[in-house]
């Protein structure tokens, strides 16, 4: 790309966007992102973007539908302002749990969101730890899929924990937990669970030895915290000496903080793909920044360089 590099942001995660631009030694692009009196989203790009390589940072966090509209309208505004290339930087991709039909007459909303982003005018997407990797295939434009795993591994390596076992809280996360296990040099345990209804989980059984060991539960997101709390209780009952947890996306919906504050978890580590509220510290939650990783990815995309080393 020969055009200028410019970074804009919606309102969902301004702090992360500013941290990314600080790493890039840029100012965050000037844009009006607000609402009309009738509640409709209002966007106005307040600087010249003609011929520019533009990145729009927006996590699809609560309120998800509103932040999605901010992203779509901003991408449309940039396209109509003659930006040369537009990359939607989506640290947390909302609706990712709705990536398949579990019963009849259900939507595949993750695919619908991909269609909307493409139709709005995005040329490519940069995201992190999709709930289902197959979501990449929902897009007909290039998707760069970053991983927070190496960052989280470095954090736990620095703690110098002994006799560690990495735990997948469900069968679907075994691949993620196994990659984490290989990086940190530990054994693996797997918890089998079922969901009798949305956002409710029940542990059925566990495979692996955790007796007398330090357990690290590895997941991609923490929603209500029910899965983590039940997993931590199971590990404690099976003899684990300490139980830690880490995930890329800390959603913390409903009564999540209260549940985790009263749980067997020694510490929960998440990244800032979603802004952490003040009460996070009271629930023993530590937040790590992914700004440097996103900044490096943005610069590599701008310069048409490989991102493979960032994935590994």
Image (spheres, helix red, strand yellow):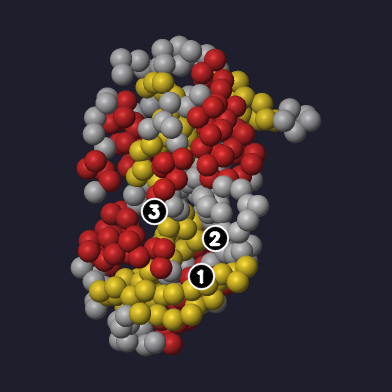
At 24% from the left and 30% from the top, the residue drawn is 305
Q: Earlier in the sequence, mark 3 or mark 2?
A: 2
Q: In this view, does 85 lie above or below 285?
A: above
The x and y percentages for residue 266 are 42, 74
Q: How far apart are marks 3 and 1 (CA)?
A: 21 Å
Q: In this view, does 278 lie above or below 206?
A: above
- Disc 1 secondary structure class: helix
Query: Which residue in the protein does label 3 denote?
Result: 288
Query: Which residue in the protein does label 1 denote?
Result: 227
Q: Nearer the viewer, residue 97 or 105?
A: 105
Q: Distance between the residues labelled 3 and 2?
A: 18 Å
The x and y percentages for residue 274 are 50, 49
In this image, 187 relative to 35: left or right?
Answer: left
- Disc 3 secondary structure class: strand
Q: Earlier in the sequence, mark 3 or mark 1?
A: 1
- Disc 2 secondary structure class: loop
Query: Which residue in the protein does label 2 denote?
Result: 223
At 23% from the left and 71% from the top, the residue drawn is 186
Q: Are marks 1 and 2 in contact (CB under 8 Å)?
A: yes
Mark 3 or mark 1, which is nearer to you? 1
Q: Which of 299 and 110 is in front in this view?
A: 110
């Amino acid at each position: 790309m020969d055009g200028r590099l410019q970074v804009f942001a919606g309102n969902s995660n301004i702090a992360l966007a500013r941290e990314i631009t600080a790493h890039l030694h840029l100012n965050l692009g000037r844009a009006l992102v607000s609402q009309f009196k009738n509640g409709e989203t209002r966007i106005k790009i307040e600087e010249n973007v003609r011929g520019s390589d533009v990145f729009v940072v927006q996590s699809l966090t609560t309120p998800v539908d509103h932040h999605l509209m901010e992203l779509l309208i901003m991408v449309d505004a940039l396209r109509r302002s003659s930006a040369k290339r537009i990359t939607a930087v989506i640290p947390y991709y909302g609706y990712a749990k709705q990536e398949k039909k579990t019963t009849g007459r259900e939507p595949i909303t993750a695919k619908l969101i991909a269609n909307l982003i493409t139709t709005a005018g995005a040329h490519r997407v940069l995201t992190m730890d999709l709930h289902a990797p197959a979501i990449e295939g929902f897009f007909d434009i290039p998707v760069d899929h970053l991983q927070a795993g190496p960052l989280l591994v470095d954090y736990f390596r620095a703690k110098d924990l002994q006799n560690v076992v990495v735990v997948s809280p469900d069968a679907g996360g075994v691949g993620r937990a196994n990659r984490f296990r290989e990086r940190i040099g530990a054994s693996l345990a797997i918890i089998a669970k079922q969901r009798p209804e949305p956002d409710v989980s029940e542990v059925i059984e566990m495979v692996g030895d955790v007796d007398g060991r330090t357990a690290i539960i590895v997941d991609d997101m923490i929603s209500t915290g029910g899965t983590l709390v039940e997993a931590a209780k199971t590990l404690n009952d099976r003899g684990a000496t300490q139980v830690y947890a880490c995930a890329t996306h800390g959603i913390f919906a409903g009564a999540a903080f209260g549940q985790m504050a009263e749980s067997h978890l020694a510490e929960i580590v998440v990244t800032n793909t979603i802004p952490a509220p003040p009460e996070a510290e009271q629930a023993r939650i530590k937040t790590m920044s992914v700004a440097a990783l996103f900044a490096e990815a943005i610069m590599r995309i701008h310069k048409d360089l490989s991102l493979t080393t960032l994935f590994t």
